[in-house]
């Protein structure tokens, strides 16, 4: 075996999370999750004596992260006295004037790329050369092709490319042309920025975020582990990679269909029955209600009434419609102000705006006892 390495990134340490319910309580717990994931990663590298750790950008959530958080990271990486640590910066922790990487001293086992052109660091004892570029501002519309094209790989070494960006033709976040980078012949391409982990057979990998950060991030999270062997007969390096999951709270988005026959207690029960009690008390839930609802049912208190059944819950009722025969309602009230208001709302040209205006008006009139 030539070497082993861990590929991670996008921790976003120091992120000020916001939640609809008791934001500070949940935000504090979420920040603890990030630190727990970081500590688990450090413990794994130390216990397994992994000789190389790659951090592909956005280790910190912003350039304004607390100095105590930066020192905590530096101390953790310094404890890896048998591991080389190579870091590139991303769009959140870019290496500008206020860079978090300028605020503390880093141990001798840590190498940080500080320019937005491609450079390399060669680790002789691992026969591994790592090429990388860091962000020095928070936006890149173009890939630095000039410095990339000047790279001359030494085929006797194991060559890794590190970059933080999007595989896209156009982007504000360093668009990466895979055909361009693949032609260069790197043995492994370690990418950051996209929070969903992914690995191709050709050795191109997004490490993903070690824990999910919002409702848009589902699926297993953790970090990538790779082992490199040498095929002396064919004079090539063989990389085998796997995924080390990290346990954390997940984000669950669940759709619940309602009918006009559902009472308020039926709706409560349907929501609680969406998952087991163990899961409900562990994870983050967003419930999206859809369908038709009895117009007399007010959903304003649904979050409060479900609070004890979930660790965290937020509800979306924008897809619900009151079960009302609008034509009949207008006809029955044609000679009074209610009918006149609804008739005027019917004249709104934009269909979605017209629908919402009518629904909100009817709900308000029901709430005030007018209907």
Image (cartoon, rainbow, N blue to C red):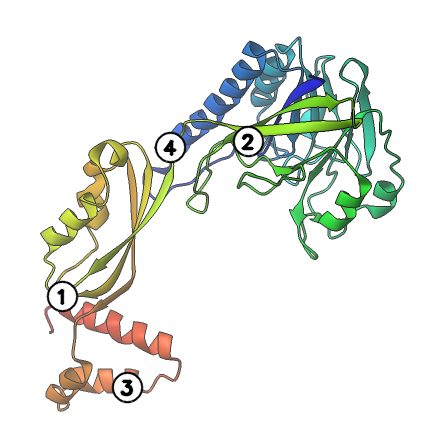
Q: Residue at x 62, y 41 (%)?
A: 200
Residue 316 visible, this orientation: yes
In the structure shown, which secondary structural element does the residue marked by tag 4 occupy? loop
The disc, 2 or 3, on the residue closer to the chain's N-terminal end is 2
Q: Residue at x 16, y 63 (%)?
A: 259
Q: Residue furthest front?
A: 233
Residue 177 visible, this orientation: no
Q: Residues within 10 Å of mark 2 (few under 14, many from 20)?
A: many
**Which numbered disc covers residue 244?**
none
Task: Pick whichever, 275 or 363, lies toward us.
Answer: 275
The disc, 1 or 3, on the residue closer to the chain's N-terminal end is 1
- Quadrant for residue 187, please give it: top right
| x and y percentages locating residue 94 in the rendered image | 69, 36
Instruction: Tell me, yes or no, whether the two marked residues, 1 and 4, touch with CB atoms within 8 Å.
Output: no
Task: Pick whichever, 78 or 145, lies toward us.
Answer: 145
Q: Which residue is mark 4?
A: 249
| x and y percentages locating residue 338 in the rendered image | 17, 82
Q: Residues within 10 Å of mark 4 (few under 14, many from 20)?
A: some
In the structure shown, which secondary structural element does the residue marked by tag 3 occupy? helix
Q: Give how far apart the Cα atoms at labels 1 and 3 are.
A: 26 Å
**Which numbered disc covers residue 11?**
2
Q: Is residue 46 above or below residue 211?
A: above
- Which is in the foreground here, disc 2 or disc 3? 2
| x and y percentages locating residue 339 in the rendered image | 18, 85
The disc, 1 or 2, on the residue closer to the chain's N-terminal end is 2
Q: Give how far apart the Cα atoms at labels 3 and 4 are.
A: 49 Å
**Which numbered disc covers residue 260?**
1
The disc, 1 or 4, on the residue closer to the chain's N-terminal end is 4
Q: Residue at x 74, y 24 (%)?
A: 231
Q: Which residue is mark 3?
A: 344
């Amino acid at each position: 075996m030539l070497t082993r390495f861990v590929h991670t990134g996008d921790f976003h340490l120091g992120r000020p999370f916001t939640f609809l319910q008791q934001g500070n309580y949940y935000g504090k717990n979420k920040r603890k999750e990030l630190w727990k994931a970081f500590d688990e990663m450090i413990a794994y590298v130390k216990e397994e004596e992994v000789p190389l750790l790659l951090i592909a950008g956005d280790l910190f959530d912003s350039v304004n992260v607390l100095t105590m958080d930066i020192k905590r990271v530096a101390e953790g990486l310094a404890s890896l006295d048998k591991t080389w640590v190579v870091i590139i910066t991303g769009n959140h922790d870019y290496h500008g004037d206020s860079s978090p990487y300028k605020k503390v001293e880093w141990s001798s086992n840590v190498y940080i790329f500080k320019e937005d052109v491609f450079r390399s660091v060669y680790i002789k004892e691992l026969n591994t050369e790592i090429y990388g570029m860091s962000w020095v501002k928070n936006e890149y519309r173009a890939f630095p092709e000039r410095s990339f094209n000047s790279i001359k790989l030494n085929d006797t070494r194991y060559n890794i490319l590190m970059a933080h960006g999007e595989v896209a033709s156009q982007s504000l976040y360093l668009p990466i042309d895979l055909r361009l980078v693949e032609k260069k012949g790197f043995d492994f391409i370690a990418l950051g920025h996209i929070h969903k982990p992914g690995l191709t057979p050709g050795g191109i990998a997004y490490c993903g975020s070690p824990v999910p950060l919002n409702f848009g991030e589902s699926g297993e999270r953790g970090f990538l582990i790779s082992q490199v062997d040498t095929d002396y007969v064919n004079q090539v390096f063989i990389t085998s990679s796997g995924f080390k999951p990290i346990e954390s709270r997940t984000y669950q988005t669940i759709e619940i269909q309602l009918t006009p026959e559902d009472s308020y207690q039926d709706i409560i029960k349907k929501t609680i029955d969406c998952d087991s009690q163990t899961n409900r008390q562990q994870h983050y839930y967003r419930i999206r209600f859809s369908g038709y609802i009895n117009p007399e049912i007010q959903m304003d208190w649904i979050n409060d009434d479900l609070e004890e059944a979930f660790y965290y819950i937020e509800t979306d009722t924008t897809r619900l419609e009151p079960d009302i025969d609008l034509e009949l309602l207008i006809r029955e009230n044609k000679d009074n102000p209610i009918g006149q208001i609804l008739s005027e709302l019917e004249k709104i040209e934009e269909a979605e705006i017209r629908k919402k205006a009518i629904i909100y008006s009817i709900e308000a009139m029901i709430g005030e006892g007018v209907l």
